[in-house]
Image (cartoon, rainbow, N blue to C red):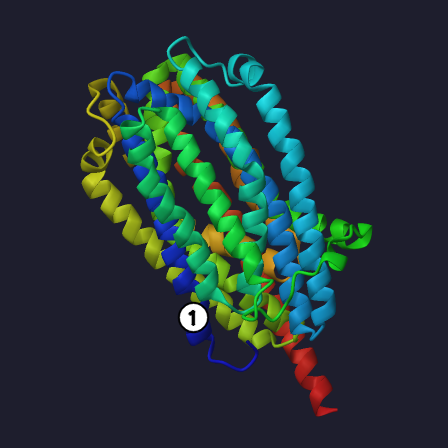
Amino acid sequence: MGTEKISKLLLKFSVPAMIGMIVNGLYNVVDRYYIGKIPGTGHFDIAGVGLVMPIMTIAFAFAMLIGMGGSTLISLKLGEKKLKVAEKYLGNGIFLGILLSTLLALSVIIFKEELALKVLKASTDTYRSTVDYMGIIAIGFPFLIIGYTANIAIRSDGSPIISMGTILIGAILNIILDPILIFQFNLGVKGAAVATIVSQLVSMVWAVGYFRSKKSTMKLKLKYMKPNMKYMLNILKLGLAPASLQLGSGLVMFTFNNSLKKVSGDYAISAMTIVQGINMFFVMPIFGINQGLLPIAGYNYGAKLYSRVKEALKLAIFSAMILSTTGFILIQIFSENLIRIFTENQETLVIATSGLRIYTIMAPFIGFQVVSSIYFQAIGKPKLTMFLTLSRQVLFLIPLVLILSKLFGEAGVWLAAPVSDVLSSAITFIMIKKEIKDLNRLESIEVNQKQI
């Protein structure tokens, strides 16, 4: 980590993560594809799943709260050669995952009808699929959160290939089970939810089992799972920024759904669900670069190798922007073809095709935004990550959705995302420029101390 060429390291850690993220993104696409093909109700079932997305995003926010916080600390402690402390963070992370995921799952299962009607505002056409999908998917929250916590720690442990395998196993299993449970067992949208939680369970068992095997440097020990308030608070503190990003995403989805429902109805919600699935598929590889950067930047920052930190950051940003620009070009050219994969419903098709082009018009900047935000998380500066991520989601995007939807109707809802991207990219650029100067200063201090 501290001596290998940065470009080689980033390839080693990012490519497996990118493959895993692409397959995971493909699962989201395939999931929506099969749901959209449910005879008679597919377009409403997609809308029901779309309404549940904010709840699922909250669950993933808990996963990132624990997983990203714990993995950051693990990388930093391994860089400082403190293996025992790293193992304690692993154990306390798994304990937190068990505790918080159980509480969240029970809350959603008990109040699913109230959530569907009073919070998510499901219509007569979408109520049944919303409740059915949400009630089953909540059962898998412990599998999701514990599995993610363990999986991202695998990468910090220096095993990106195994981490990729964990994601691939779950995603491929989900893709296989979807058509079987949805159509052959005639479970409809319930089948999609069951496929998801089964795949999450298998991934969790695989990931946790790694730390009980001979392949891992760190070991998951029961004595280190005993709750330690200091360690748990440190995990929550460092995980708060990426978790806030996810919570912000959930709030954005909720705002999008409510605004679209008011101006266009359930067909527009179906369109947004499809658009976000396509967009996520193209963004997923960038998250792979993120996951590769996280342990590299964290380790080298902890080891005070600041020139390597700068190199890793610049290379990650450059790679991410190439990917995001490529995605933008493909989406703009093949927008209608991509939408037709999911639906032939004419109302949904027209709304989604136009919406996808507008929604992604500033996509080339996404690579820069995403990588820059996670960089501060990697070096133990979660407040800056939180500021950058929330500036796009909460400070800009949500108000823009509410304002532009009133001014321009449905088009205003789609337009809010690219306008927000422009504003948040400008702020991100200022912060990254300042951080590069700070790294140069730290590097000079370190060089001077060595000369003395």
Q: Amino acid at mark 1?
A: Lys
Q: Which residue is depicted at the point 59% across and 62% down?
A: 211
Q: Which residue is depicted at the point 50% across and 44% down?
A: 201
Q: Looking at this rendering, what residue extends furthest in the right direction? A: 229
User: Which is more toward the observer, 376 or 176?
Assistant: 176
Percent from the top left, x then y, of residue 304?
65, 75
Judge from the rendering whether residue 91 lies leftward or rightward of residue 160; answer left or right.
Answer: right
- Compared with residue 270, is residue 311 higher up or lower down, i.e. above or below? below
Judge from the rendering whether residue 451 lies leftward or rightward of residue 197; answer left or right.
Answer: right
User: Which is more toward the observer, 381 or 194?
Assistant: 194
User: Which is more toward the observer, 349 or 165?
Assistant: 165
Q: Is residue 359 visible?
A: no
- Report which quarter residue 44 is drawn in: top left
Q: Which residue is depicted at the point 63% across and 28% down?
A: 106
- Compared with residue 226, is residue 145 higher up or lower down, i.e. above or below? above
Task: State the residue position of label 1.
Answer: 12
User: Helix, strand, or loop for circle 1?
Assistant: helix
Q: Looking at this rendering, what residue extends furthest in the front direction? A: 185
